[in-house]
Image (cartoon, grey):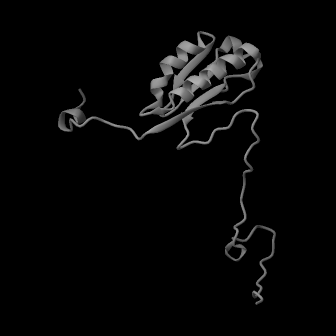
């Protein structure tokens, strides 16, 4: 029992999490694709979690010894074992995360454009380097 628990016996609760699995690299073969889809179906069936890291044991058992499964503070990552990684390196193959706080994308989904966005209210936009600032009066 920790010092905090001695003085504050109320149970620790986490915010509700909605788990989802994202495949970040293209599966190498049909067997790996089926395995990842099976893991995705399992996560979808158990999506409502208090702490989604509780799914790590089941994911580890499902994926087998050919994959490394680990947890971060609020996610589960899936990597190929170093012997199987080959040219791809230690990158994540897939991740289980909270849909309410993250927005990972599958490997085949288009990337979201990044960089500065223009304001929909152009009169309130910040100046862009190299573009002269013009002042105009609105016409009625």
Image coordinates of residue 65 in percent, x first then y, are 59, 9
Choose between 114 and 89: the one closer to the eye.
114
Image quarter of the C terminus = bottom right
Image coordinates of residue 11 in percent, x first then y, are 27, 35
Image coordinates of residue 49 in percent, x first then y, are 45, 32
* Residue at horizontal 77 percent and vertical 41 percent from the top: 110
Choose between 4 and 101: the one closer to the eye.
101
Image coordinates of residue 87 in percent, x first then y, are 77, 19
The picture quadrant where one finds residue 83 is top right
Image quarter of the N terminus = top left
| Number of residue marks | 0
* Residue at horizontal 21 percent and vertical 38 percent from the top: 8
Choose between 34 and 123: the one closer to the eye.
34
Q: Residue furthest left?
A: 7
Left or right for 85, reference 4: right
Classify 35 as above or below 47. Answer: above
Left or right for 55, reference 133: left
Classify 68 as above or below 119. Answer: above
The picture quadrant where one finds residue 16 is top left
Q: Residue furthest front?
A: 45
């Amino acid at each position: 029992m920790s010092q905090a628990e001695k003085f504050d016996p109320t149970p620790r609760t986490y915010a509700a999490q909605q788990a989802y699995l994202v495949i970040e690299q293209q599966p190498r073969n049909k067997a790996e694709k089926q395995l990842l889809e099976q893991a995705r179906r399992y996560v979808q069936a158990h999506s409502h979690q208090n702490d989604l890291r509780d799914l790590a044991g089941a994911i580890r058992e499902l994926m087998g010894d050919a994959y490394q499964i680990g947890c971060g503070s609020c996610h589960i990552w899936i990597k190929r074992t170093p012997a199987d990684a080959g040219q791809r390196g230690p990158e994540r193959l897939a991740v289980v995360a909270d849909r309410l706080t993250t927005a990972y994308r599958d490997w085949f989904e288009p990337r979201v454009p990044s960089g500065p966005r223009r304001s929909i209210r152009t009169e309130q936009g910040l100046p862009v380097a190299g573009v002269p600032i013009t002042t105009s009066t609105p016409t009625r």
